[in-house]
Structures are given as structure tokens and as C-alpha cells.
Image (cartoon, rainbow, N blue to C red):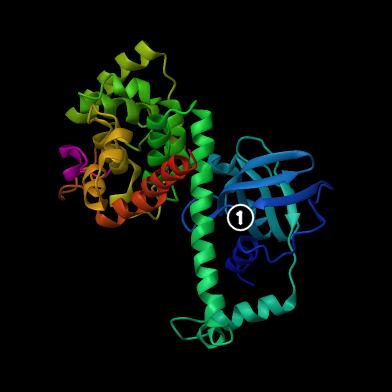
Amino acid sequence: MREEFLHFIWKNRLFGTEHLYTREGRTLVVIDPGDYNRNAGPDFFNSRLRVGETIWAGNVEVHINASDWYSHRHHLDHAYDNVILHVVANYDAAVESAGGTVPDTFIISWEARVEEKYNEYLNNPDIIACRNDLDKIPGFTQRHCISRMAAERLEVKTRRIKETLNSTNNDWDETLYRLLAKYFGMKVNAGPFYLLSLNLPLRIIRRHADKRLQVEALMYGQAGMLEPGAFDREIYDEYYCSLLAEYRLLRQKYSLKPAESWMWKFHRLRPLNFPTIRISQLAGIMSTGRSLFGMMKSCAGTAELREVFTSAASAYWNDHYIFGSYKKGKEKRTGSMMVNMLLINTIIPMLYYLWQGDRQG
């Protein structure tokens, strides 16, 4: 058995959904299995569970054997401190995180035919493994399924917009900023980017929007990347020292508290997706000095929207991917795929939510 099979079972809720219990004897309801993570860190982000009478939001880690927690060295990695459920096929050890938390354990099970079909698809040499089964599904059902999934995804996104609006007292600019930050992190760093937006309110950025260096200093500083030991080497280059000097003043002025730098993921990422690069690109968008929400609403079409949300990292990053490590390169601009992802996941759902409100009003 491969661990990826257990990921498949959890992601698609093929373990049955009624009368579930943790090993500790608490009832378990899987509200949302979470976002599947193929990179460093827990296997599923943003999961929502009801354990006993409490609803939890956090990450889920999946293993064949519970003791894999230790063989994979998760007990030394603070990225696993907010794991709210440890899903295992075989319970052979109690586990504890680096921060001292002990997650509940769910011993997962499944029907034999599910594993047989999974292995059949896995060993199928065709590009589309389930191609031979598609003909068994009526065309109308296929089209209906695709339409339904598209509608469901849009509903999920608009529901998150509503929840964020409620938490910001209907501040559309702050809501757009938070959601934009989340998707700048993509799947791997979505959580840290969203936390950055919470730790650095838009009202502070607005006061310095005409000075990009100060906006970047605020973002890198609040991300914990300007703290001693955030990187493997001492850094003395001019750009870094300028950021550090600016942040020290702004940190004192606004009584800011930086996040822990360990939460940022670099492992297995393409260098263009490093959070160091993405933070600078986000800072470029936030340094316009204008209402980003107003600019979004005034755009006549997707071409104008792409222009608003396309940004280049500062010139320093032309020859760097992390602080203090020179590597000759080129301008680091948000590519078309990145901009399209922002449009699909943030901008278009927000415009749709606005349109719904106007129509109902």
C-alpha cells in the first residue's frame, strides 16, 4: 500500500461518513477534508472537522503507520504543530508535535473494491486512466457533473468572500487584500500569506503606499524574514539592510509583532514561486496608492484586470531568489498563469458576489 492511496481515500471521503470516531473515543464529522498538499508540510491544509462538540480548522496528516510521524521527523518540525487530526491505517504509536500538541487519531478503513479500482487506474498506461469507464456514463450526466462542480466551486469561493467581509466589517478593500494575499501563496504558502495579511492590516500599508521600500519592509518584517536566523547566513547587502532599517522604525511606530519565519515553505518549489519573490510582487500591487477594489470595479474586461494584477518584483530580485544569495537571472514578473489564478480564485468570484448583491438589491 502506498501513502498516496490513503490521501486519495481521505480526499474523496471513501472511508464512509457516518458514525465515525477517533481512537480517543470522540465522534468525528468531516466537514471539509481540506486542500490536498503535494509539497512540504502537512498533507491537507484548511481542513474543517467536528471532533466531539468542537469544530476545528487546521491541517490533517496522513500515514500508513502512526509511527511514520517520527520516521518522517514531524516531531521536530513546527509546521506540524497545527495538525488537528492524524489519519492512519495502522495505529502503532502515540505521537506529539514539536510544540507539544497531541492530535486526535482516526484509524481509516475502506472497502476492498475501492483499492482494487484505484490500483487498476494507477497501473493503466493510458493518459486518462478512467477513459474506458467514461462511456458508461451518459453524456448528459457528464455535462451536468461538470456544471455542478463549477457552480459548487464558485459557491465555495463566494462563501469565503462573505465570511471575510463579515470579519472585516464589510471593508471591501481589506477583504480583497486578504484573499489576494492568500492566493499569492498558492497552495504551499497560502496559510502563511493569509496570516501575513492578518498581521499587517491594509490601513498600515495605505499610509506608506507611495514608498514601495517601506511596504516591502513591512511585509518582509511581518513575515519574520528580517529576524536573526531566518536564513542560513548573515546578510549584509544594501537592499536587505535598507529593509531592516525601515522595518525597525515601523515596527516600533505601529507596535508590530513579526510571525515565525519557519512557517514559510521553500522546499520543492520552483524558485519563481519562492515566498521572497511573491511578497515583493504583492507589495508592488499594494503600492499603487489607490483603492485596489475601486480599480477592480472600474476595469472594463479581463485585459484591464490582468494589467492591474500583474506586478514585477523589485530590481534586487532580478539577481536573487533569497536574501543574500546572488544568482544571475532576470525580471521576476507575475506570469500569465499566476494572474489567471488570481482572477479565477479571487477577482471573478468577488465580482460575481457583487453582481449577486446588485441583482438582489
- Seen at 23% across and 26% down, the residue is 289
Residue lying farthest top? 253
Between residue 279 and residue 139, name the one nearer to us: 139
Between residue 16 and residue 70, name the one nearer to us: 16
Residue lying farthest right? 25
Q: Position of residue 285 (x, y in %)?
A: 26, 37
In magenta stretch: residue 17: no
- Seen at 39% across and 27% down, the residue is 222
- Seen at 68% across and 42% down, the residue is 96
The answer to which image quadrant residue 244 occupies is top left
Q: Amino acid at mark 1?
A: Ser
Q: What's the magenta region?
A: 312-322
Q: Position of residue 341 (x, y in %)?
A: 36, 53
Circle 1 crowding by C-alpha within 10 Å: few under 14, some 14–19, many from 20: few
The residue beneath circle 1 is: 71
**Looking at the image, is 3 positioned above or below residue 326?**
below
The answer to which image quadrant residue 136 occupies is bottom right
- Seen at 22% across and 31% down, the residue is 288
8 relative to 296 in the view: left or right: right
**Looking at the image, is 177 positioned above or below residue 22?**
above
**Looking at the image, is 354 positioned above or below residue 208?**
below
Residue 158 appearing in the image:
yes
Q: Position of residue 67 (x, y in %)?
A: 68, 55
Quadrant placement of the N terminus: bottom right
222 relative to 136 in the view: left or right: left
